[in-house]
Image (spheres, rainbow, N blue to C red):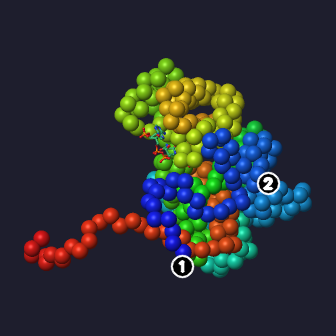
Amino acid sequence: MTTAPATFVKGLEGIIAAQTEMSYIDGVQGVLEYVGIAIGDLAKHSTFEETVFLLWNKRLPTKGELESFTKQLRANYALPEGMIERVRSVPTSAEPMHMLRTMVSALSMHDASPNENSVEAARVKALKILGCTPAIVAAFDRHRRGLEPVAPDTSLGFSANFLYMLNGEKPTEAMTRAFDICMITHADHGLNNSTFTARVVISTLSDMYSAITAAIGSLRGPLHGGANEGVMKMLNEIPSVDAVEQYVMDKLARKERIMGFGHRVYKAKDPRAAELMTLAEQLARDTGNMDLYTKSKAIEKIMEREVGSKGIYPNVDFYSATTYHCIGLKLDLFTPMFALSRIAGWSGHVIEQLGDNRLFRPKAEYVGPHNVAYTPMDNR
Ligand code: CMC
């Protein structure tokens, strides 16, 4: 019998609850590596498809392996029969994250063996979910705009195909590359809340769909992936760069959080924020959105002055907001974009968990009363 350390740690801060070979974070130095490769190098040289191969296989592919993996992913772009009707049945007022969570759950009903949990079967399901969720998001956005869905184009890569299905026209190379960099930088990140959720769910030997569905539910929270939408709302609320100082100082005085800042693990600037900052600047310049970038830079400067000593710096969500806006995405599609990419990480973790599973079952410290006499109803 094993006994766990009997100390309560709020929010499980610093607790090591799983082992992974996928991503490494040094929160003090501001380092993120996927399978040992710096995120900056992947953002510069890799593609989303290659990055997913790396995460799932723990090594870079050869040319032939990448071609074959890409082909398999493209073979999963199309939605299973009947799914478009499900998307069409969603109220147009629904939030895309609620829609996505429900539709990924529904995918399980289109799988002849949804409960198969061998590592091989989990990989097939991972490819399926990763491959077709862009079609779900694109079809829903078109549905609420009163437009017909656009069938996927299997001659296009993951990022170009998504933007094509969303807009009905092929994206420029610059937009495709920008979106691909967003997908690469969001793909995996240690045992973040949604990844932990996915691992907890699969540890009961439930199924891949349940694990990813639960992870989507976790991601949408404003303290997690939902922060990117919060950042955009804040940038829209601030009328000009001159108003930034007052806005930030008022919020801090009210003890409110500035979205896109702070992180449980990073106490330095999130390296993904550094990558996305460069991208946001370039896109803002190219698309006439420099006001968003200059406001963001001003917020960052004030936050560093005011709370930098507490280790609060921009996280991945801060500059991704400007980046997504410049790519032409609607505000409520920002968090679904995070999900499209993080499915790679979640499913990779599910596969790792299945490869060496033990049920997650921590304990709660009981802090209520004992030996309380039962009071009959009439005496309460
Ligand atoms: N703005 C202002 N103050 C902050 C912020 C912020 N964004 N984040 C933390 N603090 C302060 C907090 O008030 C506290 O101060 P004090 O010690 O004086 O009371 C101190 O920093 C520590 O805060 P904490 O809540 O104990 O830190 P945590 O590790 O529990 O929270 C966090 C991490 C990400 C939830 C938090 O930083 C936050 O709420 N940030 C805003 C939301 C956000 O951007 N989330 C995205 C996270 S990264 C991407 C992802 O995972 O999806």
Are the residues tagged 1 and 2 within 8 Å (C-beta)? no
**39 shown above or below 375:** above
Q: Secondary structure at mark 1?
A: loop
Q: Position of residue 262 (x, y in %)?
A: 53, 41
Work out whether 23 lies above or below 356: above
Q: Disc 1 marks which residue?
A: 1
Q: Residue at x 49, y 39 (%)?
A: 259
- For the residue labelled by badge 2, is the local secondary structure a helix, a strand or a loop? helix
Q: Residue at x 68, y 67 (%)?
A: 352
Towards the viewer: 274 or 171: 274
Using the image as rendered, state which of residue 348 and residue 173 is in the foreground.
348
Q: Visible in this render: residue 321? A: no
Q: Pick whichever, 12 or 181, lies toward us.
A: 12
The foreground one among 174 and 372 is: 372
The residue that mark 2 highlights is 50
Instruction: Please provide percent x and percent y for residue 107.
Output: 60, 69
Q: Quadrant of the N terminus?
A: bottom right
Residue 217, how many percent across, how many down?
Answer: 51, 59
Q: Is mark 2 within 8 Å of ligand 1?
A: no
Residue 318: image location, x then y, percent: 57, 38
Q: Nearer the viewer, mark 1 or mark 2?
A: 1
Q: Quadrant of residue 174?
A: top right
| Residue ID at (45%, 61%) | 7
On the rendered structure, is 371 left or right of 280?
left
Q: Is residue 252 visible?
A: yes
Q: Name the residue: 49% across, 19% down.
A: 242
Three-letter code, disc 2? Glu
